[in-house]
Image: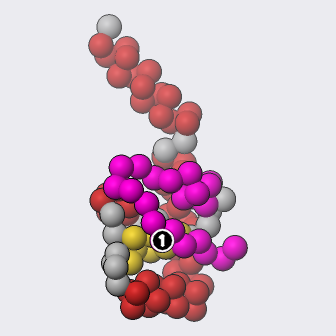
Amino acid sequence: PDIFLVTYSDNISVPYSVNYCLAHRTPVVVSDIAVFKEINEEYDCFEIYKRDNLNSLKDKLIELLENKDKQLALRHNIETFCNLNSWEKIAQKIKTIYNNLL
């Protein structure tokens, strides 16, 4: 798909469906819950709409569907996010923390 829409989520973690889309470098439209906003502040890899506001959702979807440059920018930012947060990178961070504790 060109884009993916996540219309629900809790405020605790990123759903598997979002991780799947990111792994496939698919732009994702998500609600403005804390976990998505926090990730987006650092990586700008989501298009975020205001929860409980259908006009916000509609506007974000139309904007993203019509703007191929925005889709490409999100794909690039998703690539950066995935490269910096791969299991290999996370394992290295954990190893460094563990070694520092010894």
The quarter of the picture where the N terminus appears is bottom right
Along the horizontal axis of the image, is 67 left or right of 39?
A: right
Count of residue discs:
1
Colouring rule applied to residues:
secondary structure
Direction from residue 45 to residue 27 in the image, left or right: right
Q: In this view of the protein, which residue sits in the foreground, 20 or 54?
A: 54
Residue 18 point in image, percent of width and height: 54, 58
Magenta-drawn segment:
1-23
> Is 34 positioned to the left or the right of 26 in the image?
left
Who's the residue at 62% across and 55% down the image?
Answer: 20
Residue 23 vertical placement versus 48 (above, below) = above
Q: Position of residue 59 (x, y in %)?
A: 44, 90
Q: Is residue 12 above or below residue 77?
A: above
Magenta span includes 9: yes
- Is residue 80 something one can see in this rendering? yes
In the foreground, 21 or 75? 21
Q: Could you tell me residue 19's position as x and y percent?
A: 56, 53
Which image quadrant is residue 34 in?
bottom left
Find disc 1 in the rendering and name its residue: 7
Could you say which is closer to the camera, residue 61 or residue 52?
52
Mark 1 crowdedness (10 Å alpha carbons): few <14, some 14-19, many ≥20: few
Task: Pick out the residue farthest to the top.
Answer: 102
| Viewer-proximal residue among 66 and 99 | 66
Residue positioned 66% across, 59% down in the render = 24
Residue pictured at 32% horizontal, 8% vertical: 102
Q: Is residue 74 visible?
A: no
The amino acid sitting under disc 1 is Thr
Task: Determine the secondary structure under disc 1.
Answer: loop
